[in-house]
Image: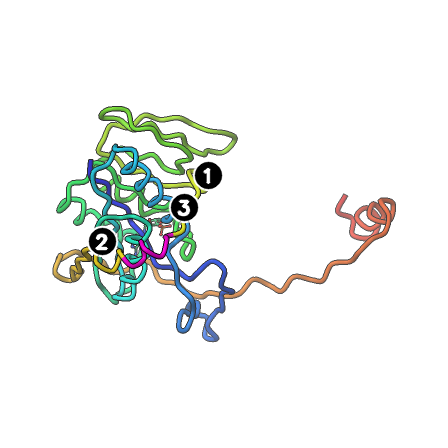
Amino acid sequence: MKVLVAIKRVIDYHTKIRVKADGSGVETRNVKMAMNPFDEIALEAAIRLKEAGQASEVIVVSCGTSECQETLRAGLAMGADRAILIETSEELQPLAVAKLLNAVVNKESPQLVFLGKQAIDDDANQTGQMLAGLLNWAQGTFASNIIINNDKIEVEREVDGGLEKVSLKLPAIVTADLRLNEPRFPSLPNIMKAKQKPLEVISASSLNIDIKPRLTVLKIESPPIRKQGVKVNTINELFNKLHVTEKVL
Ligand code: AMP
């Protein structure tokens, strides 16, 4: 079983985000970039399937600028077998990414496609669902556990108020939630080996897909600066403050 994993290059989550002065977006120049954390989890799940003998090949795919090659190499160092970059310098919104991934799926015919539940930059949580719609495949989103069972995959999903178990007929789309696993750190020998693994670059324009943005960002602004807190010494003082002074109780 071939498994495809979509990985996005995003600003490293340890980095303090700076909004551009003109409010048109966030600063990405000279900023540390990394693989979207949920995509690391998705990739770890795919690699574990391969280690368990349930997957034959793990392919990582990224859509974006040539710098995404660095992110793909990180995926190869974790354990993916080969990588595909759909290269474009255009702004990509979830529908555009879903269409590009749809083209890769049609070319590679995987049985399973893993994505992160959301990208931490746009927080859209849309690409996996849109890809499932375009392919007319079953989808198991927010996965916290998966079990392959012959031609099916059982997905435990994190839903409001608990867990839901669904059984999907393969081929299927699964999006990874935080508790699915703890992704590994690539070892130095694996980082070296990753340099030799195949990485195919396909120009997005060669696919003749309409990737034009469907929405326009009007403005991005930083959250208001939080007022400084106060320390109270006793429960009574806390109660008086909340009840009498602030009137929030
Ligand atoms: P989103 O719908 O933007 O929150 O993204 C959900 C998931 O779609 C991500 O966790 C990735 O697995 C995948 N994805 C989004 N954008 C890209 C991209 N440019 N390249 C590859 N995968 C992506």
**Helix, strand or loop: magenta stretch:** helix
Q: Amino acid at mark 1?
A: Arg
Identify the mark nearer the N-term, 2 or 3: 2
Residue sitting at x 28%, y 44%: 130
Residue highlighted by disc 2: 83
Residue 44 coordinates in the image, percent (x, y)? 35, 43
Q: CA distance from mark 1 to mark 2?
A: 25 Å
Q: Residue furthest bottom?
A: 21
Q: Please state, as top left, top right, bottom left or bottom right, where the N terminus lies in the image.
A: top left
Which residue is labeled 3 in the image? 183
- Which kind of residue does numbered mark 3 sit on? Pro
Label 1's element? helix
The residue lying toward the viewer, choosing from 218 and 156, is 156
Residue under label 1: 179
Give 210 or 81, whichever is nearer the viewer. 81
Q: Looking at this view, name the residue that lies furthest to the front.
A: 189
Q: Earlier in the sequence, mark 1 or mark 2?
A: 2
Q: Position of residue 24 (x, y in %)?
A: 42, 70
Disc 2 element:
strand
- Left/right placement of residue 89 relative to residue 35 reads left
Q: Secondary structure at mark 3?
A: loop
User: What is the magenta range?
Assistant: 186-192
> Mark 1 against mark 3, which lies toward the viewer?
3
